[in-house]
Amino acid sequence: MELTKIKVKTNRQVHPDFKINESVLDDIFVNFETKGTPFGDQERNTLKTFDLQGYIVNVKSFRIPNFINQVAYRFFRKSKAQRSFIYANKLKALNIGTPQPVAFYEETSTFLFKKSCYVSQQLDCDYTYRDLTKDFNIPDYETILRAFTRFTFNLHENNILFLDHSPGNTLIKKVGEDYQFYLVDLNRMQFKDLSLHVRIKNFARLTIHKSMVEIMSDEYAKCSGADYDKIFNLMWKETETFQEKFYRKKRLKKKLKFWKR
């Protein structure tokens, strides 16, 4: 019996600055599994770097979603790869730091969404925000933390809510005497007017350290003109609430693993 071959369609969008590299980008997408150099955390999605005719690019390959989301991404929702590309270009247009977007690729069948990837220029950094949570002896530590807070305030002033504002998703690079910040993992963002509560809650996932919350609260109060005590109390409350939820979820996962044995 002859099996019918499932038709697969590739959708892509390449940044105008990289149109000349389209054929190489196509090859990267098609041969992602066998080429490239693994990079960073491979837990949920796969990250690799590739040479793009003189540029080093970072390619994030998203794992194929469950069946329901395959249908949703095929017909109703933009994929994580497409959203990453769109949001990166929006950030660039607002002069907010993020690695240069290069392209996104998607592969679909007639009814289902399959694999996808987002391509950006590799950006070498000095630190990530996570480093600040682990090493309090980093040179210019408080200067960096206050500059990061001003960077976040600027996001909020531009009506940007970065939903994955977590320790690994901000790269920090020293340029001259200043520090510049770059957002990565961009697929979850909202663009809207932000209340003070929503703004301060946006810090909740960043650290467990009260001393860091105190510095960020002080700097955000200076930027916004709001009362320090009000900001600190709210930021610390949201931090504790997030931590409680995080560890409750972790304990539940452990119990589920135990009962599955």
Image (cartoon, rainbow, N blue to C red):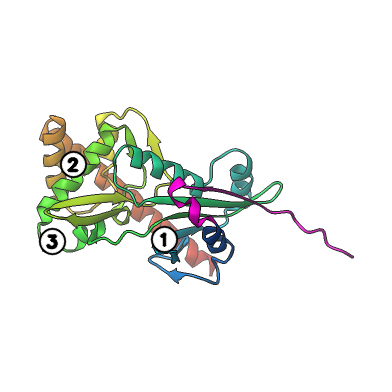
Report how far apart the C-alphas of labels 1 and 2 lie in the structure. 29 Å
Q: Which residues are magenta?
A: 1-22
Q: Residue, x 54% and y 65% (percent of image)?
A: 32
Dot 3 or dot 2: first in sequence order is: 3
On screen, residue 259 above or below 16: below
The single residue placed furthest to the front in the displayed view is 20
Dot 1 or dot 2: first in sequence order is: 1
Number of residues whose C-alpha sits closer than 10 Å to that of mark 2, classed few (under 14), some (14–19) or many (20 or more):
some
Q: Amino acid at mark 3?
A: Phe
**Residue 55 occupies quadrant:** bottom left
Q: Residue, x 46% and y 58% (percent of image)?
A: 60
Dot 3 or dot 1: first in sequence order is: 1
Q: Does residue 20 belong to the magenta stretch?
A: yes
Q: Which residue is mark 3?
A: 136
Q: Which residue is mark 2?
A: 150
Determine whether, in the image, residue 114 is placed left or right of residue 228: right
Quarter that holds the N terminus: bottom right
Q: Residue, x 13% and y 61% (percent of image)?
A: 136
Determine whether, in the image, residue 216 is placed left or right of residue 96: left
Q: 98 or 218, which is in the foreground?
A: 98
Secondary structure of the residue carrying numbered label 3? loop
Residue 124 placed where, x, y %?
Answer: 29, 62
**Residue 195 occupies quadrant:** top left
Q: Residue, x 69% and y 54% (percent of image)?
A: 8
Residue 243 placed where, x, y %?
Answer: 29, 51
Q: Amino acid at mark 1?
A: Val
Report how far apart the C-alphas of labels 3 and 1 lie in the structure. 31 Å
Q: Which residue is mark 1?
A: 57
